[in-house]
Amino acid sequence: MSSEPPSVPRHIAIIMDGNGRWAEKRHRPRRFGHRAGQKAVRQCVEYCLRHGVPVLTLFAFSSENWQRPPSEVSALMGLFVKALDKEVDELHAHGVRLNFIGALERFEAPLLQRMQAASHRTRDNTALQVNIAVNYGGRWDIAQAARTLANEVARGQLKADAIDETLFGARLCLSELPAPDLFIRTGGERRISNFLLWQLAYTELYFTDTLWPDIDAACLDAAMADYAGRQRRFGRTGAQVSGEPVAH
Ligand code: FPP
């Protein structure tokens, strides 16, 4: 059927898990693992640029990650600030558009200003859109969409009866983009962990035991090959999808 999604995903969403364990295995502090994780982010962005993947969404800091020891939270905030200072020029030169999703107002001014400046500076780039989810949670996203719709109804801009999946989905983060085709979680856990709950409804899920700092092109090739072999049915039968005559 010609409506089949292409074998290269239009959107990859990743939970980058395993930085802490990677560092602990080396008897180093966890922040050492996060620094190594930053290098893996760079490799992954380069991979998407090389393979024509147009959208990449990375879960960098969840709504729940504030519960980590203050020293780790502050190391991560420092790393994000430094990463933005260091990487934005090159990302911009390669045509990467940076976009941040989550409850951004919780961040302190130095980081918030850098995120806003990076989004603004790269907003017209088209080679690859990288969405970085920070202080993001899938439940937060659904709640903020519900709140937006409730306010529109209260202001008389919308009738409650008009709310359907399309209208609801349009108030969620990333609504202007195709939903992720491929979700990857590294680090061995097999969970969604409050990532893009609505947006992942029909996404192909891929889990690997590889710790995030060890991710390289070969690991991403394996995920892409696995994805290319999946039959995406979206509720239809296998025969319908492959175009065989339908038996009644
Ligand atoms: C999960 O590993 C990782 C994080 C909570 C942070 C992700 C941050 C990076 C990859 C660093 C750079 C990111 C950007 C966007 C510049 P974990 O700490 O939960 O590892 P563990 O499960 O082994 O403890």
Image: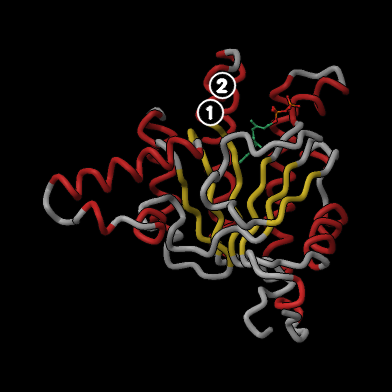
What is the spatial separation of the Cα atoms under label 1 and label 2, in whole angstroms?
A: 6 Å
Residue 159, percent across and down? 19, 55
Find residue 67 and report its image quarter: top right
178 w.r.t. 152: above or below: below
Give the structural element (helix, strand or loop) at label 2: helix
State the count of labels. Answer: 2
119 w.r.t. 190: above or below: below
Callouts 1 and 2 close, C-beta under 8 Å: yes
Residue drawn at 65 percent across, 56 percent down: 203
Residue drawn at 47 percent across, 47 percent down: 100
* Residue type marked 2: Val
Q: How is the image coloured?
A: secondary structure
Q: Is mark 1 within 8 Å of ligand 1?
A: no
41 and 227: which one is in front? 227
Image quadrant where one finds the N terminus = bottom right
* Residue type marked 1: Met
Residue 11, percent across and down? 61, 61
Q: Is mark 2 within 8 Å of ligand 1?
A: no
Relative to 239, 56 lies left or right:
left
Residue, disc 1: 77
Relative to 19, 141 lies left or right:
left
**Label 2: how many Cα within 10 Å (few below 14, some 14–19, many 20+):** some
In the image, farthest residue toward the front: 248
**Label 1: how many Cα within 10 Å (few below 14, some 14–19, many 20+):** some
Relative to 241, 69 lies left or right:
left
**Residue 73: numbered disc:** 2
202 w.r.t. 3: above or below: above
Relative to 187, 114 lies left or right:
left
150 and 47: which one is in front? 150
Ligand 1 location (quadrant): top right
Residue 119, percent across and down? 43, 53
